[in-house]
Image (cartoon, rainbow, N blue to C red):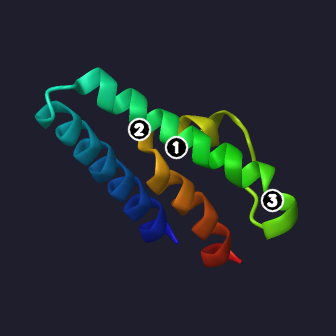
Amino acid sequence: MEILKYGGIAVLAIGALAILIFAVKTKKLFKTLLFNAFLGLAVMIIIDLTAKFTGAHIPVNWWTVGGCAVFGIPAVCGYLVLPIIFI
């Protein structure tokens, strides 16, 4: 179980670094990061609003909102897959 924890932290760190490198290479750092955060939060809100119909639910707290704002849509996908892996 420890390998999953440290492996997950490593994957998240690599993902954050990839997003930052992409944002720097586009020469529009602030716009790219803001757009990524907006898309992540928008998808999380859409999933939360449709949870009654789809059965997919992401608990809204500071950790999930922060993850969706920093990592965008991949974080939302990760939050949807985590209950499948650990249950």
> How far apart are labels 1 and 3 at the CA level?
16 Å
Residue 43 falls left or right of residue 23:
right
Residue 27 position, x and y percent, is 14, 27
Q: Mark 2 points at which residue?
A: 36
Residue 67 in view of the camera: no
Q: Which amino acid does label 3 sit on?
A: Ala
* Residue 7: quadrant of the picture: bottom left
Residue 28 in view of the camera: yes
**Residue 31 against residue 13 in the figure, above or below:** above
* Disc on the earlier residue, 3 or 2: 2
Q: Name the residue under label 1.
A: 40
Residue at the spot 56% in from the left edge and 54% down from the top edge: 76
* Disc on the earlier residue, 1 or 3: 1
Residue 51 position, x and y percent, is 81, 59
Query: The C terminus lies in which quarter of the figure?
Result: bottom right
Circle 2 SS class: helix
Residue 80 position, x and y percent, is 62, 64
Q: Which amino acid does label 2 sit on?
A: Asn
Q: Mark 3 points at which residue?
A: 51
> How far apart are labels 3 and 2 at the CA level?
23 Å
